[in-house]
Image (cartoon, rainbow, N blue to C red):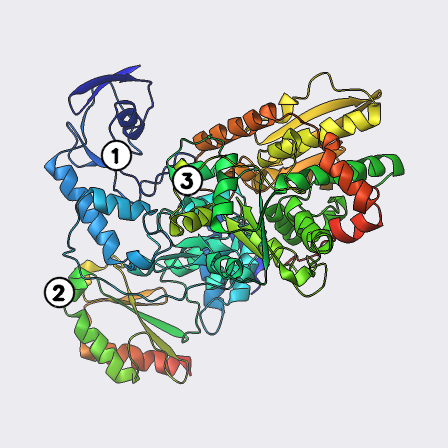
């Protein structure tokens, strides 16, 4: 997908830039925006590069570094914290053999924190792409990862 | 009008007034950090909080507008406590080497901390150790000092229209920086230094070159000469407690001599020379079908702008060097021989209201011998003030002195170079008389004066109406460039100054520059012009003598070699 293409789809206006950049990023195998991508969005929208860079670095949904095919975002806000998000992170780190913020060697998974994703009623929760998983237990986490591994091969 | 009480004092203010401005009217100071009178209200630093009767929480004075019957308290335990915590939190993330800081004693944050009587900080100090940018000859960035007020973002974006700085990152990792954290030398920065002028701390500052000047002064083998730009004399006094708008030319000359400079000269002399060369260039372009409108070339921030943003319009720019560089070229290519020295024996210093001048001075083409720069060091007005304080010179007590010959004699036309519209007015005074052979009935071209963004005037030159325009700030310059590109600019001559108000509002001028201060400095410039015996460049006898003795004629071979230059396409 090209920058121009995605802007045509969303409508080339500053207000629609976030959605366009997100879709563009998702279409990339490594789930990140390069310097050239950011400059291209600035050029096409007529916004200053510093402004687009500001947006990209502000929202945790964007990344400037290559990431895995699946981005696992563990909520670290209060309700999830109280319900043991620390254990979720430990479980994921053990299963994937990486630390928070890292990407698995096969490029399949990246582990990240996120702010509240609005699923406090099923804390602890995490989000992978557009899918939200709640009431997480070690068994549930293992099965989610196992399924994605199979699907992603 | 609205009736309010501030600290039990009843006052009347116009509707829509902010608490901050109402308090000022009542003689009450409220501290500010992110607020700047010429920029948008951001209300992000919170230091200006006050108590408003009936409001559940403290309100920011900069952004809250008064209403009928409002009761404000600016000095309660709650307010003092809140302000203290705000400053403590800012200080916890601020590089705290105040005694080594370039802005020691000139820092808004330091002053507020002192005023609030902060003696210890309950918050843990967080050292971030972010990389400093010392890549350029003009400006330096130290993100560890930045308090994220956002003034620089707005100055670069809204006033200059460049938008090179913005917030990046989030939460406690937020920074203000160019996209991708690039160096200022790797982006299309024009080095105008307006960001540094509005920065309340030392996050963006000019590169200091004071020590190189001391070294030269202390070198017995060097003849150290200095030139002073028109705008410095109307602002330097502010560094020593004078009101803005005080003309301190004589004291400044005395101070420079006291510092140990061998000769004290005036950039105004080469400003007059610029008018002769540039005026003749304009007449030549007008009569030979040259590229019009011709654009002025005095402001190095503006030159940096057109080279990087509109290189296709470079043929419009006058080939005249700026007065600073004309001076430098004459100092090394004429004055040296005149006093029996080699160019490398001369150390030439200039005192400028400008940070971009530091960049200009080190351009490789600005060297008559191809080895040494024509202007060895550029100091800003602020740096000169620092030097005077280092030397223990009591500025106030100095007796006024005169500039040295031969580059000390100048006219009112040269002084007004310091204000937006000044170069145009000076050029018109000369061009009119050269073309018509008549004496101008009035020397004051008031249409091109003042702080309006783009000004126009039409002058009748022997029956031919000649239309001119004047712009200051790069946002306004951009408008005129677009007009030229569209083919709709029917001007013969355009003056462009990079900084708001012209050089009097330059990036090297004393801190605290606001439009209010700019107006006072501009008034002082025209006052200095009015008081000079000669007010037209072509009547400067020292200039006439220079042509007779050395240069020959305007636009002649020597002029071409020493006083004119070329520009580069530097579009990113």
Which residue is tagged 2?
A82
Query: Disc 1 marks which residue?
Result: B30
Q: Residues within 10 Å of mark 3 (few under 14, many from 20)?
A: many
Locate residue B96, reporting x and y percent.
27, 59
How many numbered tags mark residues here?
3
Left or right of B140? Residue B540 is right
SS for dot 1? loop
Q: Cα distance, mark 1 to mark 2?
A: 42 Å
Q: Residue at x 45, y 69 (%)?
A: A32
Q: Residue A79, position in %: x, y?
A: 16, 61
Which of discs 2 and 3 lies nearer the camera? The answer is 3
Determine the residue positioned at 72% across, 40% down.
B273
Disc 1 to disc 3: CB gap under 8 Å: no
Whether B70 is drawn above or below B237: the answer is above
Q: Which label sits on residue B130?
A: none
Nearer the observer, disc 1 or disc 3? Answer: 3
Is A25 placed left or right of B123 in the picture?
right
Mark 1 vs 3, N-terminal side: 1
Q: Quadrant of residue B101?
A: bottom left
- Of all chains, the one bearing label 1 is B
Looking at the rendered structure, which numbered label has been put on residue B395?
3
Q: Chain of mark 3?
A: B
Residue at the (25%, 52%) spot, across then down: B90
Looking at the image, which is closer to me, A3 or B506? B506
Is B82 on the left or on the right of B20, as rendered?
left
Q: Position of residue A34 (x, y in %)?
A: 50, 68
Instruction: Give the quarter of the figure containing the N terminus of chain B.
Output: top left
């Amino acid at each position: 997908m090209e920058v121009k293409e995605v802007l045509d789809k969303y409508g080339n206006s500053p207000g629609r830039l976030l959605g366009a950049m997100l879709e563009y990023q998702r279409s990339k195998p490594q789930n990140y925006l390069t310097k050239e991508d950011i400059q291209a969005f600035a050029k096409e929208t007529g916004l200053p590069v510093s402004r687009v860079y500001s947006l990209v670095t502000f929202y945790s949904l964007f990344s400037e570094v290559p990431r895995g095919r699946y981005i696992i975002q563990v909520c670290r806000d209060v309700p999830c914290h109280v319900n043991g998000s620390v254990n979720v992170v430990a479980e994921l780190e053990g299963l994937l053999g990486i630390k928070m913020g890292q990407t698995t060697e096969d490029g399949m998974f990246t582990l990240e924190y996120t702010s509240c994703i609005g699923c406090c009623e099923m804390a602890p929760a995490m989000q992978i792409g557009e899918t939200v998983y709640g009431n997480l237990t070690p068994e549930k986490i293992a099965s989610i990862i196992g399924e994605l591994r199979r699907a992603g091969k | 009008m609205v009736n309010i009480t501030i600290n039990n004092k009843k006052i009347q203010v116009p509707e829509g007034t902010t608490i901050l401005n109402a308090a000022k009217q009542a003689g009450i100071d409220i501290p500010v950090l992110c607020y700047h009178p010429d920029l948008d209200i951001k209300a992000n630093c919170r230091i200006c909080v006050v108590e408003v009767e009936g409001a559940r929480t403290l309100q920011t004075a900069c952004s809250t507008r008064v209403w009928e019957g409002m009761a404000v308290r600016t000095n309660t335990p709650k307010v003092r406590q809140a302000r203290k915590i705000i400053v403590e939190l800012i200080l916890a993330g601020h590089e705290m080497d105040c005694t080594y800081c370039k802005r020691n004693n000139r820092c808004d944050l330091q002053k507020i901390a002192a005023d609030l009587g902060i003696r210890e900080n309950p918050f843990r100090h967080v050292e971030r150790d972010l990389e400093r940018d010392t890549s350029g000859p003009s400006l330096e960035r130290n993100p560890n000092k930045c308090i994220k007020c956002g003034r620089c973002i707005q100055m670069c974006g809204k006033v200059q229209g460049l938008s090179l700085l913005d917030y990046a990152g989030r939460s406690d990792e937020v920074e203000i920086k160019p996209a991708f954290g690039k160096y200022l030398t790797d982006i299309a920065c024009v080095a105008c230094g307006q960001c540094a002028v509005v920065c309340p701390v030392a996050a963006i500052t000019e590169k200091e070159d004071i020590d190189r000047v001391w070294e030269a002064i202390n070198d017995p083998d060097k003849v150290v000469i200095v030139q002073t730009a028109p705008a410095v004399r109307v602002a330097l006094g502010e560094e020593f407690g004078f009101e803005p708008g005080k003309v301190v030319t004589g004291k400044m000359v005395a101070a420079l001599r006291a510092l140990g400079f061998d000769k004290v000269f005036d950039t105004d002399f080469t400003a007059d020379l610029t008018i002769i060369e540039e005026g003749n260039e304009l007449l030549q372009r007008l009569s030979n079908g040259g590229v019009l409108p011709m654009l002025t070339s005095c402001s190095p921030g503006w030159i940096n702008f057109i080279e990087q943003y509109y290189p296709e319009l470079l043929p419009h720019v006058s080939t005249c060097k700026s007065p600073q560089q004309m001076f430098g070229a004459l100092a090394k290519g004429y004055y040296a021989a005149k006093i029996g020295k080699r160019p490398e024996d001369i150390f030439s210093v200039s005192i400028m209201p400008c940070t971009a001048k530091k960049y200009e001075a080190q351009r490789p083409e600005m060297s008559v011998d191809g080895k040494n720069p024509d202007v060895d060091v550029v100091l800003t007005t602020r740096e000169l003030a620092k030097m005077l304080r280092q030397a223990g010179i009591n500025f106030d007590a100095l007796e006024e002195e005169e500039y040295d010959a031969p580059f000390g004699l100048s006219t009112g036309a040269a002084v007004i170079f310091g204000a937006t519209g000044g170069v145009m007015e000076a050029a018109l005074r000369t061009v009119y008389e050269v073309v018509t052979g008549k004496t101008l009935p009035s020397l004051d071209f008031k249409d091109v004066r003042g702080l309006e963004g783009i000004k126009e005037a039409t002058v009748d030159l022997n029956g031919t109406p000649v239309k001119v325009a004047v712009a200051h700030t790069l946002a306004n310059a951009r408008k005129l460039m677009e007009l030229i590109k569209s083919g709709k600019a029917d001007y013969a001559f355009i003056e462009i100054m990079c900084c708001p108000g012209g050089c009097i509002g330059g990036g090297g001028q004393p801190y605290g520059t606001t439009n209010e201060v700019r107006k006072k400095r501009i008034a002082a410039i025209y006052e200095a012009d009015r008081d000079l015996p000669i007010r037209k460049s072509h009547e400067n006898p020292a200039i006439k003598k220079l042509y007779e003795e050395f240069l020959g004629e305007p636009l002649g071979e020597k002029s071409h070699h020493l006083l004119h230059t070329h520009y580069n396409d530097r579009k990113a």
